[in-house]
Image: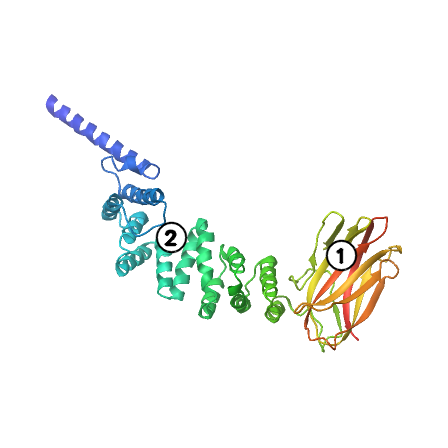
Amino acid sequence: MRLKHSLILIAFGILGCWSALVSFGNAIYQSTPRVAVGLPGHNGFADGRLARLLLRDFIVVNGTSFSGVIPPAAKQHAIEAFKSEPSDQYAVSVLGLSSTSDLRRARNIFEASLRQNRRQTISSAWLAEDAARRNDLARSLTYFDLVLRRQKDADSTVLKRLVTSISDPKSIPLFVRLLKDSASWHLLFWQTASEADANLLNLAIIRASLMQFDYRQPVQYDSLLLSRLVSIGAYSQAWSLNRKLAGDTFVDRKSNHVSLGFNKERQLQPFFWIISGDRGDVGAQIDEKKSILDISSVSRSSAVVARRLLRLDNLIFRLGVEVDADLASQSGAQMGVELACAEEKRMPVALSFPIGRLRKQGAKVDLRASECHFFWLVISIDNDTDDGLDFSILDVTLDKA
């Protein structure tokens, strides 16, 4: 009887130790998979993590990106992991990468992996690149979207690869479909996509097409796209997009009066005022509550303080400027207003008003002989006095004469 009890106790002791080792292995497999796989009864996730770790170390040691070569030990651990845990993303990823010499087989592995778990970013990334190699833009963009929605760390790398497709006109409806439902990566997309000149015209079409879905984003990203279009001379495309996004802010034969004031609502640069800011001797800022432009300067200073892009017909206009009424006349202080053709280097129409003599000042501008349609309206300050200067511009107007 004592022997029987002893055997039972030994058996329970062995089972207890085994259970403890298994529990310990399951607890540490994420942080130390090398230790976990050496313990009896470890789960397949430990083999999967170790397979990924071995592959990563192999790439780092060889100082290169993945070249299709899988260390034998990594492949073996991936196989062991897959036997017990077919859904383990690391095991599937390593097995898929080990099959890249046979693209069809690798594709089948990664597609099966995604059917089990759409959060597997390695599978999505490989399939995105595979689809791009086969010129299958629709599938490529769909897989890139999966990567970007699941792994924020991949944003910059993946987006640089993604935006190379924008220059292809066939990609336009695909990007519209991809972007119409908001996602966290969209803002970085617009910033990244606007960097390449080759993307800009198609990007403008994409942004305009998204208006039908009431697509909204912070104004600085729309302003960035408009400014980039202007920088490559695509004035008409920028103006057309601005009208869709912000409405009409120009003078033509149907408009007798337009205020070019400082109300920021629904306004986008460069078709709204670009303020030079504070450079030390001259500073300017928009008072958003009053919708006016406050300007300050020290003595003997001059600078451009604001500018904006306009689209004008070749007519005669009256340009008006309304300044702070309480400002005393200061001899030697001048406010300059310049209307310069944006499309070509030509002599600008330059006007100069003494600051403080009148609340409202203006002059006629004859553009009938001009071949330009897009103009920079530039405001500058020239304080050639011994005193500092503070004043406000209340409004700038254009009226058809």
Residue 333 is situated, as x and y percent measured from the top left of the image, at 84, 55
Amino acid type at mark 1: Leu
User: What amino acid is found at the position of numbered circle 2 in the picture?
Assistant: Thr
The x and y percentages for residue 365 are 78, 72
Q: In which quarter of the image is residue 291?
A: bottom right
Label 2 residue SS: helix
Q: How many marks?
A: 2
How dense is the environment of label 1, judged by Cα within 10 Å: few (below 14), some, or many (20 and up)?
many
User: Mark 2 highlights which residue?
Assistant: 121
Q: Mark 1 points at which residue?
A: 293
Q: State the image coordinates of residue 251 (x, y, percent, origin top left).
A: 71, 72
**Residue 113 visible in the current orientation:** yes
Between 125 and 265, the one lying in front of the other is 125
Q: Is mark 1 on a helix, strand or loop?
A: strand
Instruction: For the N terminus, give its image quadrant.
Output: top left
Q: In this view, does 248 lie above or below 389?
A: below
* Distance between the alpha carbons at the discs numbered 2 and 1: 50 Å
Say whether residue 238 is left or right of residue 176: right
* Mark 2 crowdedness (10 Å alpha carbons): few <14, some 14-19, many ≥20: many
Protein image colouring: rainbow
Q: Is residue 25 above or below residue 260?
A: above
Q: Can residue 1 be seen in this view?
A: no
Residue 144 in the image: x percent, y percent?
41, 58
Q: Is residue 333 left or right of residue 93?
A: right
